[in-house]
Amino acid sequence: MGRMKKTETPAKLRDEKLFKLIRNYLLVYLPVQREASVHTVTDYRTVLSQYLSFAAEKNGIKLNAVTFDMFNRENLDAYLDYLTAEKGFSTATRNNRLAAIRAFVSYASACYPEYLALESELSAIKVQKDDPFSKVDYMTENAVTALLNEPDAKTKIGLRDRFLMIFLYDSGARISEALGVRLRDVKLGNSPQVLLFGKGNKVRAVPLMEKTVEHLQQYIAVFHKDESLTSAVTLFYVLHKGKKEPMNDETLRVRLQKYADSAREKCPEIPKKVHPHLWRHTRAMHLYQHGMDLSLVSQWLGHVNLSTSLVYAYADTQHKRDAIEKAMGGERSGITDTTLCTVDDDALLKKLYGM
């Protein structure tokens, strides 16, 4: 007889109370008591999972050894700095992550009063203010082309990754929207479109371009060949032990950065950090530069307020100003003097868009 396999026992948790709190928060409190959407719960799950991994690495321990007292100001400050300095996340994303962790700690302190001190400690961390008219990051059209050409579409993974980037660019979807798309949300026919489920359970239909549909059909033929187009299976998935599971955002981020690092050798215009939201900014910027009215860009992005989309108008103005200065040899005289342009630019843009 062969030797019996030793049954593996799960690693003992140093702070079992913490992980029970997280479980109840994600499975009961948010979806049942707060009636939060699936996307909202997924966002909170992602933030908590990433913070736990960060705390474990920062303290040189395994995940099962993380304790609640590691949700302190020192660790959270370091995490927020890591998001902006190393991951290249925007101020808005940084503030959202801070709010998510604060919300969990607030829930925990309501369950266990001994955690009130930590909640008070985290409340002292300031929300960073972001200039709504600051230059938005986006890629050039050359950079987009180079990135789309980087995956080897002759391979299954290369085909998937190329279409993923095409989809992010053409739809302008947020990362949670893109990874939440199911086969039944894709509508082909005379007017191809995809339904995106955004913040606050708002749904918007985004048209798909002809070339995108061609790539979509190639992708479906390989990754969903046995599936009905009315299926609830997610459009983008990974195989785990032979089962299809929705792709998570960290996997997507790693894949995008991999192609960015390799494609940059051929196209130096590719930014150092290429993250999913950069594709959204890029598509919006290109649409605006090619003549789409800002109000349509706003609707297409799913922005509640037009003012949120105003950053694209300002960024384009700044882009033109930089080009003029470059053409003038860097001279800052006359009309190219930014002290003469900046205030009038902003004032004009605000007036044009009812601000």
Image (cartoon, helix red, strand yellow):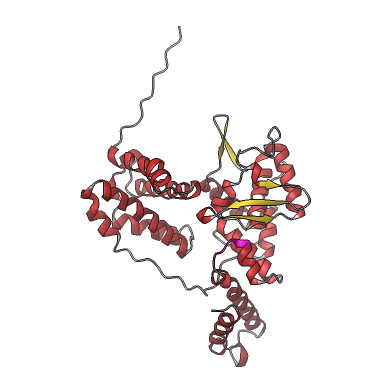
Secondary structure predominantly adopted by residues drawn in magenta: loop
User: From the viewer's perspective, is residue 272 above or below residue 22?
Assistant: below
In the displayed structure image, the side of residue 280 where residue 64 appears, left or right:
left
Residue 115: x and y in percent read: 24, 50
Residue 22: x and y in percent read: 35, 43
Q: Is residue 301 magenta?
A: yes
- Quarter placement of the N terminus: top left
User: From the viewer's perspective, is residue 340 above or below residue 149?
Assistant: below
In the displayed structure image, the side of residue 267 where residue 69 appears, left or right:
left
Quarter occupied by residue 147: bottom right
> What's the residue at 60%, 55% (across, down)?
173
Residue 77: x and y in percent read: 34, 59
> What's the residue at 60%, 62% (across, down)?
301
Q: Nearer the viewer, residue 342 or 213?
A: 213
Quarter occupied by residue 230: top right
In the displayed structure image, the side of residue 123 where residue 330 appears, left or right:
right
Report the residue that reaches farthest toward the bottom: 334
In the displayed structure image, the side of residue 136 where residue 206 appears, left or right:
right
The residue segment tinted magenta is 300-304
